[in-house]
Image (cartoon, grey):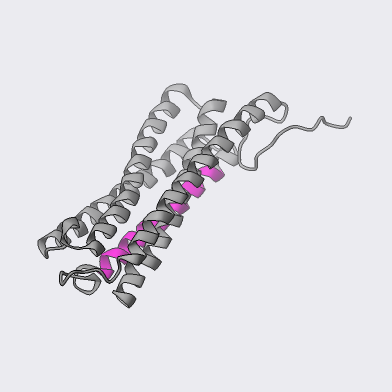
Amino acid sequence: MKRAPTHSYPGINLGERHASAHKATEVVTFGFWVFLMSDLVYFGLMFAIYITMIDAQAGGPGPHELFDLKSIFAQTLILLTSSLTVGLAMLALKYNLPRARIVLWFGVTLLLGISFLVLEVRDFMAMAEQGGIPQRSGFLSAFFGLVPLHGLHVAAGCLWLIVLGIQLRVKGMTDVIISRVVRLALFWHFLDLIWIGIITIVYFGGLTYG
């Protein structure tokens, strides 16, 4: 017998015959994509401001004095690894592995996210000790308008991981929770894409043209 067509997402196991659940998820996921795209536009504006301010250093410290490439490399490695662990959580979801497996990978992702934030805050404090504060120059105002904004997104993602972990434990793998897991994964991968832009434009661009 030919099976009736259903809405489906690769990676989401809402049940083959639960077309209504898939349809509801489709609407929410589309709305979340709209949010991500609007956030991307905002980041694009901040990148544009930074590019125009890259040599507006007003005699103050610039990228060569302030940027710590070793720390930036460590932050990049941590964030990209966290994207891998989120992907492993999604694979566990896709193949209906035990809930504990998803919680485990999310826990590792949370630790990596917190490690990234610790290193980033340490860099900001080191920059401040060298006079690299937002009001010092246009370059630093643009830098602190962009990079900490990404850090705030990572902090929001960490909070989301904690709340979702609690919901997984209390409510289990309901359709609503699965949908939230998928949106969290989208959000986390989005943060990685923004960080790649920061590495390329803010740090490497700053060291090249600043």
- Relative placement, left or right, of 113 versus 65 is right
Furthest residue in direction top, as rendered: 171
Q: Residue at x 45, y 52 (%)?
A: 83
- Relative placement, left or right, of 115 versus 17 is left
Q: Residue at x 23, y 61 (%)?
A: 140
Between 150 and 107, the residue placed more toward the observer is 150
Q: Residue at x 66, y 29 (%)?
A: 23
Q: Quadrant of the N terminus?
A: top right
- Magenta span: helix, strand or loop, mainly? helix
Specify start and end residues of the magenta stretch as a single range: 68-91
Q: Position of residue 115 (x, y in %)?
A: 28, 51
Task: Place residue 31 in its image quadrant.
Answer: top right
Compared with 95, 117 (above or below) is below
* Residue 107 visible, this orientation: yes
Q: Quadrant of the C terminus?
A: bottom left
* Residue 77 visible, this orientation: no
- Relative placement, left or right, of 78 versus 190 is left
Marks counted in the figure total 0
Q: Residue at x 42, y 26 (%)?
A: 167
Compared with 134, 35 (above or below) is above
Q: Is residue 154 magenta?
A: no
Q: Position of residue 198 (x, y in %)?
A: 37, 61
Q: Position of residue 193 (x, y in %)?
A: 46, 56
